[in-house]
Amino acid sequence: MDEPRLKLAIQKSGRLTDPSLDLLARCGLKISRGKDQLMAFGENMPLDVLFVRDDDIPDLVQEDVCDLGLVGLNVLEEKRLELAARGHPVRFQSLRTLDFGRCRLALAVPQEHPYEGAASLRGRRIATTYPYLLEQYLRERQVNAEIVTLSGAVEIAPRLGRADLICDLVSTGSTLQANHLREVETVLESHAVLIRTPLALAPLKGEWVERLMMRIDGVQQVRESKYIMLHAPRAALAEIRRLLPGSESPTIIPLEGSPDKVAVHAVCRENVFWETLERLKQAGASALLVLPVEKMLN
Ligand code: ATP
Ligand code: ZN
């Protein structure tokens, strides 16, 4: 019998597509994908990738059409509220927070408009593609405002006279600036999430989900981690260990012919900046070397 294959849904074309494919590649997945194809076959894992609109991902996973999905928390939370409002159970499960797709759902007002906290929203018209998240935000602050639900191009709604302000996704803020809008409140901090079906997986599929999650953890740790090597006088060891950023237990190696010196090797779980190297050098370290980490498994 053929091995059962996992189906993973990712965004077909948009901001999450490249980082999702990059994450899968770093997890060791090789896929063959023709242009415009809806599905790609995993050549070295029993896992196929389905390319869809990001808004469809929660439903596809919830309804067990796909076993896994990579989607923004913003889309997921909006869906969660929508399902609840319709009296439907929320059944998809979040497995991992991912380190890409960072953005925030924010309220923004026209640049010249004054804003003095949530009370300034009272009686206003707010344009958004996230009506449920916005409704929850307003309800929690006991503010009555009109929600104008649009399917896109939210940032031009104030200029068109369709709304007084907007609630939209922001990352750098350059789109807001280009539209003469000023960010005033954060409604939701977002990032990509790995979700799974509510149904039990066949044993082999379940094992692959576990392996995939372990590899994702490894990939995410590695992105920030560095391997640092240096020589240090034994007398300065305590100070040097204190300066090493985010490292647990460095390896200390004696140096042949230099009894008062040792080599220190450590994995640092954060980026190592020039300032840190300069401080280590001041503390007596020499022959400093910082290397990127390729893979990590804990
Ligand atoms: P689709 O055709 O798949 O529906 P879309 O227009 O909804 O595409 P994109 O603009 O590509 O989607 O955004 C996809 C996701 O990327 C968002 O839901 C959000 O989680 C994330 N994202 C990250 N940064 C931003 C940003 N600056 N603006 C909008 N979305 C962002
Ligand atoms: Zn979308």
Image: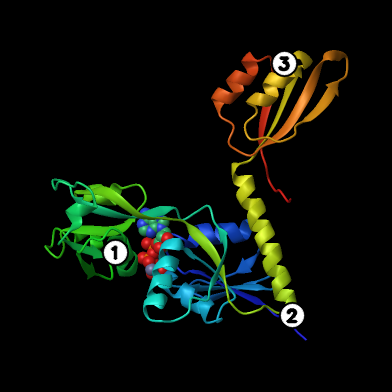
The residue that appears at 26% across and 48% down in the rendered structure is 184
Q: Are marks 2 and 3 in contact (CB under 8 Å)?
A: no
Viewer-nearest residue: 37 or 234: 234
Instruction: Give me the C-alpha separation between circle 2 and circle 3.
Output: 57 Å
Q: Secondary structure at mark 2?
A: loop
CA neighbours of label 1 inside 10 A, class few (<14), some (14 to 19), many (20+): few
- Whether residue 79 is situated above or below residue 171 in the rendered picture: below
Mark 2 vs mark 3: which is more N-terminal? 2
Locate residue 138: give its quadrant: bottom left
Q: Which residue is mark 2?
A: 3
Mark 1 vs mark 3: which is more N-terminal? 1
Amino acid type at circle 2 is Glu
The residue that appears at 63% across and 47% down in the rendered structure is 221
x and y percent of residue 234 in the render? Answer: 78, 16
Visible in this render: residue 27? no
x and y percent of residue 108 in the render? Answer: 24, 52
Quadrant into which the N terminus falls: bottom right
Mark 1 vs mark 2: which is more N-terminal? 2
Q: Which residue is mark 1?
A: 139
Q: Is residue 84 left or right of residue 125?
A: right
Q: Which residue is mark 3?
A: 236
x and y percent of residue 201 in the render? Answer: 67, 78
Instruction: Give me the C-alpha separation between circle 1 and circle 3.
Output: 58 Å
Residue lying at the far bottom of the rendered structure: 1
x and y percent of residue 136 in the render? Answer: 33, 65
Q: Secondary structure at mark 1?
A: helix
Please state which of the two labelled residues, at mark 1 or mark 2, is closer to the viewer: 1
CA neighbours of label 2 inside 10 A, class few (<14), some (14 to 19), many (20+): few
Amino acid type at circle 1 is Arg
Q: Is residue 169 left or right of residue 117?
A: right
Locate residue 167: give its quadrant: bottom left
